[in-house]
Amino acid sequence: MTRRLGIRAVAVLLAGGLVLAACGGGDDDATPEQIEAFCATTTPFITSFESLKEINQGAVPPSIEQAKLEILDFIATLRTLLEAAPPPIEEDAAQVSEVVDATETRVEEATSADGLSEELQATVADDSDSILSDFAPIQEYAEENCGVEPGG
């Protein structure tokens, strides 16, 4: 149960609960190519997020190795999304990236399910306000320019 809470906490707080709807739109501060590149990262991000949610909601909790792989895969797709951030959200993406780096280190260092959950919960507890406030502009940008909408 503790392990599942840790996976859910990192997924929900880092992901900001994005769900892909479609891609399109525009912004005056970014080129169409920058927007297209950013929007292209939302599909793999959402796929990884959904996979993490499925494991979290599964009847059988994942092994520590499986949980770590899923979380690290999610972090990698989140990092790709953040690296593709166009100028209007670059600073927000950089701030979220710092938290992502800390989370990745904690996940890699965890040696047990309880340890993994404790590390993730520590990250979330330490950085949850920052994660949510820094990710909000990224989510808003994705909603406006890529057809991404809030989900759960």
Image: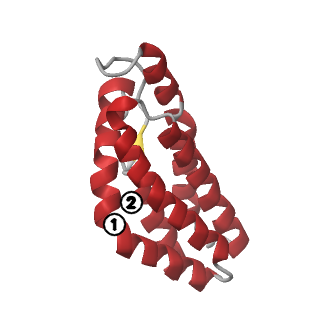
Let me know if residue 15 appears in the view: no
Is 88 situated left or right of 105 in this image?
A: left
Q: Quadrant of residue 85?
A: top left
Query: In which quarter of the view is residue 115 placed?
Result: bottom right
Q: Which residue is mark 1?
A: 128
Residue in the image at 50% along x and 73% along y: 120
Q: Is residue 36 above or below residue 137?
A: above
User: Is residue 128 shown left or right of residue 111?
Assistant: left
Front residue (pair 6, 132): 132
Residue beneath disc 2: 13
Which element carries disc 2, helix, strand or loop? Answer: helix
Residue type beneath disc 2: Leu
Q: Nearer the viewer, residue 53 or 145?
A: 145
Task: Bin the neighbour count of mark 2 within 10 Å (Cα to Cα): few under 14, some 14-19, many 20 and up.
Answer: some
Sequence-wise, which precedes: disc 1 or disc 2? 2
Q: Residue at x 61, y 73 (%)?
A: 61
Of circles 1 and 2, the one toward us is: 1
Look at the image and tell me whether residue 51 can be seen.
yes
**Residue 78 spot, x, y in % from top left:** 52, 47
| Alpha carbon separation for disc pair 1 and 2 | 7 Å
Colour mapping used in the image: secondary structure
Number of other residues with Cα within 10 Å of mark 1, as a class: few under 14, some 14 to 19, many 20 or more: some
Q: Position of residue 139 (x, y in %)?
A: 33, 41
Q: Could you tell me residue 116's position as x and y percent?
A: 58, 77
Q: Find out whether the residues at labels 1 and 2 contact each other: C-beta distance under 8 Å.
A: yes
Residue 107 location in percent, x, y? 60, 70
Decide if residue 56 is on the left or right side of residue 24. Answer: right
Amino acid type, label 1: Ser
Q: Nearer the viewer, residue 150 or 109?
A: 109
Q: How many marks?
A: 2
